[in-house]
Amino acid sequence: MSTAILTGTPVAGSPLEDDLRSLGFDVRVASGEDDVSAQVAAVPAGERVALVDPRFVGHRHSLRLALTDPRFPAGAVPGVLAVAPQSRGALTRVLSGSAAGPGPSGTASAAGEAAAGRAGTASGGIAAVSGETTVTEPSHVLRTVPDEIADALDAQGVPVHRPDLGALVATVPAGEDAGAAARGDVDSVDDEAVRLRSAVKSRDGFFTTFCVSPYSRYIARWCARRGLTPNQVTTASLVTALIAAACAATGERAGFVAAGVLLIASFVLDATDGQLARYDLQYSTLGAWLDATFDRAKEYAYYAGLALGAARGGEDVWGLALGAMVLQTARHVVDFSFNEANHDAQANTSPTAALSSKLDKVGWTVWLRRMIILPIGERWALIAVLTACTTPRITFVVLLAGCALAACYTTAGRVLRSLTRKAHRTDRAARALADLADSGPLAEGCAALAERARLRLPGLARPAVALLGVLVLLATALWTPAGSVWTAAAALFYVLTSGLAVAGPMRGSLDWLVPPLFRTAEYVLVLILAVLAARDGASGALPAAFGLVAAVAYHHYDTVYRIRGGTGAPPNWLVRATGGHEGRSLAVTLAAVLWLGGDSRGHAPSQGFTIALTVLAAVIAAVVLAESIRFWVSSKAPAVHDETGEPA
């Protein structure tokens, strides 16, 4: 139970106390401003506490946005302040006036004095002294105790979230006339309609915006009123997608039609879980992880279902399914790597970015550009329709063509932005790129030797060296016989170039390309060797390769979500235990040399390779999943949900 403390005598007829109780707060009343500190001290340290001016007038959803959002250590709107348990210590120091430090109120002592006796006046301007600057409040608005304390918390380094209220009202009116006007403003705006609109992302794909969100928001409200949580809806979406994959695996036309319908239903639920989280502010660290990882699990499981269904009809499309997963994952790594490299760039003077901003002002170009990149809504709709109306082979061919076009469009645009912008990347960005590279002991050893020799790659040399290693590795695997020792030699060369590419801070304009190049090398290598093994008669080589890439891809997605949550990359022991990208690539090529180059221990040449891929996939999946689940279930990381509308 959270506690809300009214900082004075309740106003007769005000719905404020009922609103607070409906939001889950136990309401207490301070006898006066001097009693606020005592009331706060009486609240258990592990509870959220809110300070509310009893004269507050506003919508219930305004209170909800300030008081109940779990993503922030503190939240405020005029006359209202909420403090999460982790920031209670700072609140206590501000109230006691014992903390020191500059800020909007000059010192924390000044803030304490403000909390003790400066609540404003009922007429004229309110002068809030802030060091040498005087800020004059509007004459119809009071400066309240919660407002002063919120400013003091900001001064002490506690970030106070002040939500964008839009049409919603939140004010502490000064006088009868101002109060009547504020209540009229409240009555003129439909609180529930605003809440429903705000449940939908402000920036989303065309299909989601016009074909799903108009009704999924009402499903979200229905779920909220019945006590369902976003995690439950996310799980329902996963189960629905898995049933869709099972229907596709039947290989029957009725199964394909049912699979397409269920895939759309799964996407509707996928949109609903985020809208429910925004509608009811039910954010959580576990929920953010589930939402992100289940999207990938659903899509790739559906690919596997289509491949199984095609196999029942006598057609092998496992190579296409694996290719679709490789391409889609590589696209995501490009997105993640570019965004992390520019997460806190100090400047962006790119003409390409300026052109993009101008195009955003032309309505139809916005939707066209969002559709070209084939975000998750458009992609799943395409897959669903093609599954129901055509064959798995046609579905994968069209999907590969669309994703390839989208990948070329987005990557080319980002390369142009990077080459033409003048920005200085920070240490955080360089560290994030190094973490995304997923370098194992072999590459780290080569990088250490290069740094010891003071060998630093200038300018564009870093991604160029990485690209050279990738091309040599993949070309050798593609154009030499299966199991050739030349592939293993190329893998050793790839280890060397990988180490050189990550030696030193990654601050170059195109250094963000290094992680996507590494992902492409590892995934495509597995694809090529599995195709060669299948061509030589291996049974199960491509499904085993699909499982291996899926396990490794999960590890890479997990790394991204940890970085986004501000907790950094997975522990070093996990990266070392899984070998790093270069170690796994070398291991796969050695397995190909051992089992694709000839008979060994009575196994057919290709069958041993299939077993090796299966074992490697199982080991990596077990280690990565165990650590990932342990981390996200017990993590104290902030709940970072995707509110940007970036395509998934």
Image (spheres, rainbow, N blue to C red):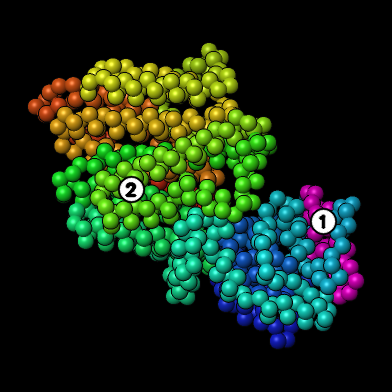
User: In this figure, which residue is indicated by the disc labeled 1?
Assistant: 105
**Is the residue 1 above or below the residue 11 in the image?**
above
Residue at 66% x, 58% y is 161
Q: Is residue 558 left or right of residue 637?
A: left
Residue at the extreme top: 453
Q: Secondary structure at mark 2?
A: helix
Residue at 55% x, 70% y is 196
Residue 235 rendering spot, x and y as whole percentages: 37, 60
Q: Residues within 10 Å of mark 2 (few under 14, many from 20)?
A: many
Measure the alpha-carbon separation of dots 2 and 1.
Answer: 54 Å
User: In this figure, which residue is indicated by the disc labeled 2?
Assistant: 300
Camera sees residue 251: yes
Camera sees residue 608: no
Q: Which image quarter: residue 115?
A: bottom right
Q: Secondary structure at mark 1?
A: loop
**Count of numbered labels shown in the rendering:** 2
Question: What span is in magenta?
Answer: 101-128
Residue at 74% x, 71% y is 171
Residue 546 rendering spot, x and y as whole percentages: 28, 40
Residue 264 rendering spot, x and y as whole percentages: 36, 60
Dot 2 amino acid type? Tyr
> Mark 2, mark 1: which one is toward the viewer?
2
Residue 502 rendering spot, x and y as whole percentages: 50, 25
Q: Nearer the viewer, residue 170 or 464?
A: 464
**Is the residue 33 above or below the residue 481 in the image?**
below
Dot 1 amino acid type? Ser
Q: Which image quarter: residue 612?
A: top left
